[in-house]
Amino acid sequence: MFRKIEAIAIALIFIGFLLWVSSSRFSFVPFSILAAIGLTLLVIARSRTQRHGSFLCRIGFHKNKHIGWDDEMKSVAIYQCERCGRTKKVMKTV
Ligand SMILES: [Zn+2]
């Protein structure tokens, strides 16, 4: 979820930058607004994800361990990260 916010934040900064370089006049204002929103989102996202601890978990490399199977769908395996405790469901196709 937080990585999605980071992606949006980076996209906003990037779009702002494109607006800035593509037009010649009065374009610094939309760029700075977009960049400010983007940077704020990025800082919020980063400060929240840092609570998970591990750097590897923050960049998406979880140490997933198979902990069980879904009650409703038997073909869905449940994995949990040993470092941050985040669970993930994976569909096992036969
Ligand atoms: Zn993790």
Image (tube, grey):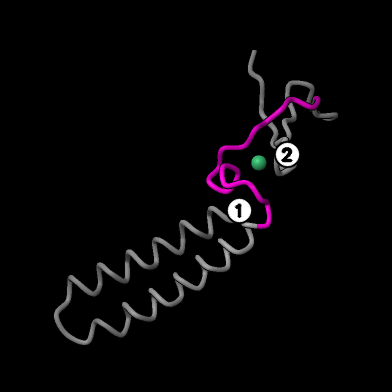
Give the x, y percent position of residue 56. Answer: 56, 42
On residue 87, the disc is: 2
| Label 1: element kind | loop
| Label 2: element kind | strand
Of residues 23 and 80, the one drawn nearer to the viewer in this rendering: 80
Q: Residue at x 46, y 61 (%)?
A: 8
Furthest residue toward right: 71
Furthest residue toward top: 94
Counting the numbered discs, the total is: 2
On residue 14, the disc is: none
> Sequence-wise, which precedes: disc 1 or disc 2?
1
Q: Give the answer, above or below, for where 85 lies relative to 19.
A: above
Other residues around mark 1 within 10 Å, as few (<14) / some (14–19) / many (≥20): few
Quadrant in the picture for residue 25:
bottom left
Q: Amino acid at mark 2?
A: Thr
Give the magenta part as a residue range: 51-68
Q: Quadrant of the C terminus?
A: top right
Mark 2 close to ligand 1, CB under 8 Å: no
Q: Residue at x 58, y 68 (%)?
A: 44
Q: Amino acid at mark 1?
A: Met
Q: Magenta span has 59?
A: yes
Q: Quadrant of ligand 1?
A: top right
Of residues 20 and 60, the one drawn nearer to the viewer in this rendering: 60
Q: Which residue is mark 1?
A: 1
